[in-house]
Image: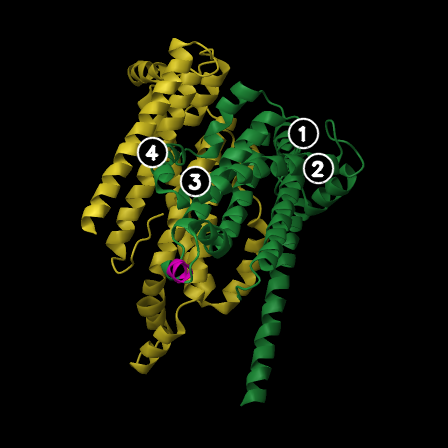
Chain colours: A yellow, B green
Amino acid sequence: MAERKRRQSSRRLVLSILSFTVVILGWYALTSWARMVPPAFLPPPQYIVTDFIRVIGSPYVGNTLIGHTLMSLQIVLGGFFMAILIGIPLGILMGWFKRIEAVVDPLFQLLRPIPPLAWIPLSLLWFGIGLKSKIFVIWLAAFVPCVINSYTAIRLTDPLLVKAALGLGVKKQRDLLWEVAIPSSLPVILGGVRIGLGAAWMTLVAAELLASDAGLGYMMQMARRALEPSVIILCMLIIGILGALMARGLRALEKRICPWVKQEEH
Amino acid sequence: MNQRGERIFDVIYQEKIFLSLSSILGFILIWHILTDVLGLFPALFLPSPEKVFFTVYEKITVPVGEEKLFGHVGISVVRILVGVGIALALAVPLGILMGWYEDLDSVTSPLIEVLRPIPPIAWIPLAILWFGIGLGSKVFIIAIGAFFPALINTYIGVKFVDALLIRAAKTLGAKDKNILWEVVLPASVPLIVAGVRISIGVGMMCLVAAELVAASSGLGYLIMLGGDDLKPELSITGMILIGVLGLVADRVILAVERRVIYWKKE
């Protein structure tokens, strides 16, 4: 059994590497060797590497690659942390106090179906094209999942746990909230934080595409105007890698904070 | 006890409705007071609720750009349907095949894992370069956004079907083909439908982003135009319609879900 499993996983590895190589080689063959696709449409893969080396050292549209990346990260993390700071407490209050829920929930339901991206033009009008407008939109994007997850998790606290706590002599509502409801909701709350981070990252790219003077999205937009698809693809890869890294980091944090939860694979 | 319990429930229920209604009315009232009565916000910044209402009413008959209000709605709906349709037509079969054939899974997974973390919005510059600013680029972005959730859900649904069901079918003499069609696929339908629901949500977001960045029609265009022409009431009109569209889409999917997986009780 173990032998079979091992053979299967090594077969998997070989196939994975093979498919990867074939795609890169095919890309290279089409663009660089057969020249069937013009480089202004799809650049050969090696262009992306040379562009990476070019823009990491010398500035491209105002900043080096590292400068643009830091700019984007700063905005995303700023909006994201503000969303956590406001969203999670609000969600917990909504889940715990019926009256707060009754007042806040309808407003929330009213605003929720509007994608956070759609706020970008209004936000530009209100805050200008600087940091503030982007942070507002990103805050909004990450805020909604933070609230929803904390709210539902607290509301759906297992009644058995509450009963057990009451049976064991917990008297105060406050203890019930802090010692039972919040710890048991932590995994779902953190799930909301993770969704929020993904939404924030996506919204940042949109905001930078639309109106910005720095950042990875801005860099892509400028590269499009200059007809340099290799820089666009480079930025896309970096955006993808950073997004995956941040998600990975949050997962590690989740494991640290609630080690009792079995993590699912996807 | 019962009667008394019911009465208490009635009171709580009424109080909840009362609080919810007054919260929405209060929101509109405060908005009205801030803009019209106190004039704290100039109309270029935040228009009054009446103004938004009359803008919606007026634009039904008066065209904005090339289309009247419902013309823009129709264009957005067509884009979304085509984009999500293409994505589903590719993602669901591929997901089923990947979940069923291990080797295909090994070949395609690494490529998908590279592309998946890139937010669909980051494809916008490349899509514009490839397809121009017409229908093609929007459909491409929406299809990319909608593709991954449908694919992943289908894949997980097929791959992690209850092993007991498969063993039972084998014992009863089913062939591989029958197991796929009569056991695995029906069992994974709930996850597939859930994936479709997420796909439509992401597709909506991509639609807005694509129309914000480059379009001359559609709801995203209205939202952007409102910002550019300093007519925030136009932006808010577009945002409201996008929200309504999202809600309608979600309702439709839920109804379909109930029809398709009638055996699964809530």
According to the image, label 1 marks what residue? Answer: B217
Q: Residue at x 36, y 47 (%)?
A: A266
Q: Chain ID for label 2?
A: B
Which quadrant of the structure image shows residue A246?
top left
Q: Nearer the viewer, mark 3 or mark 2?
A: 2
* Mark earlier in primary sequence (4, 3): 3
Residues at discs 3 and 1 in contact (Cβ within 8 Å): no
The three-letter code of the residue at mark 2 reads: Gly
Task: Read off the residue under disc 3.
Answer: A200
Q: Is residue A95 above or below residue A109?
A: below
Residue A60: x, y in percent?
A: 38, 15
Q: Nearer the viewer, residue A176 or B89?
A: B89
In the shown orientation, is residue B10 left or right of residue B94? right
Marks 4 and 3 share the same chain: yes
Residue located beneath label 2 in the image:
B74
Which secondary structure dominates the residues rendered in magenta? helix
